[in-house]
Amino acid sequence: MATNPIVEKIDLILPQTQCGQCSYSGCKPYANAISKGEADINQCPPGGEIVIRALAELIGVKYKPLDESYGISKPKAVAFIDEDTCIGCTFCIQACPVDAILGAAKQMHTIIEKECTGCELCLAPCPVDCITMPEIKEIIPDNVANKEANIARKRNNFRILRLEREKIERTERNAKRKLENNNGEKVRLIKEKRAEIAAAASRANNGEIN
């Protein structure tokens, strides 16, 4: 499928937090909506003024301040899991848009710090409030921020593909299971019918049927 050049340029400007605060499921859907005129340029709290100005220049529209109905700009933060409190529910793993959380059911979870975008999507699902978002104190150079954004974009794309693949595989397994169940039911009915015929034939041979 051909990509839209303007969508790609917009997506390159966005911070790749994949937080959904803009009301879209991620940065790429938001970029697509901006390109179609369905979303405004000031709906990205993580990007803030810098992103808004870059988008305004790219699209050729007037700058406007962040629409804080979508949230406020905050310093960069990374999730931290209190491993002593974590119950291994996996809800945070399911919520993370870049697969930056390691763990399994009923086992301790931990954050891959360098992969975390600070989206905060893991906070709400946690039933024991064991996740916090400590602020990153040091200033992140632009080249490092751009590199991190590119990695986040790739990880998000990979996650989307993985989830789609798992959905297809799950559908195929369910279809196979249903077919096997249907075939099993057919075999059972055939056996019952054959047994009925055999019983009828036996009664006829014994003179039980006139």
Image: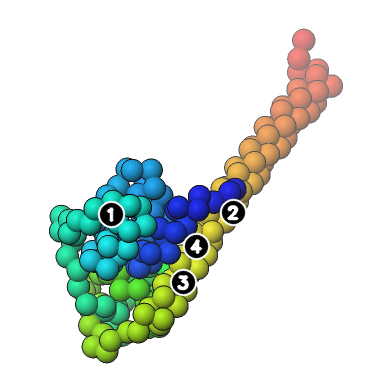
Q: Residue at coordinates 33% horizontally, 52% vertically from top-left?
A: 60
* Image position, residue 197 (x, y; %): 76, 25
Residue with the mark numbered 1: 41
Could you tell me how far apart the alpha carbons at marks 1 and 3 are, in whole angstroms?
Answer: 20 Å
Relative to residue 174, is residue 121 depicted above or below?
below
Mark 2 / mark 3, whichever is N-terminal: 3
* Image position, residue 158 (x, y; %): 52, 65
State yes or no: discs 4 and 2 in contact (Cβ < 8 Å). Answer: no
Q: Which mark is residue 157?
A: 4
Mark 4 / mark 1, whichever is N-terminal: 1
Residue with the mark numbered 3: 150
Mark 1 / mark 3, whichever is N-terminal: 1
Q: In this view of the protein, can residue 122 be seen by the observer?
A: no
Name which quarter of the figure residue 95 lies in. Answer: bottom left
Label 2 Cα neighbours within 10 Å, binned few <14 / some 14-19 / many ≥20: few
Relative to residue 98, is residue 134 depicted above or below?
below
> Which element carries disc 3, helix, strand or loop?
helix
> Which element carries disc 2, helix, strand or loop?
helix
Could you tell me how far apart the alpha carbons at marks 2 and 3 are, in whole angstroms?
Answer: 29 Å
Name which quarter of the figure residue 72 lies in. Answer: bottom left
* Image position, residue 168 (x, y; %): 57, 51
Residue with the mark numbered 2: 169
The residue closer to the viewer here, 127 or 27, is 27
Q: Residue at coordinates 41% horizontally, 81% vertically from top-left?
A: 143
Q: Amino acid at mark 4?
A: Asn
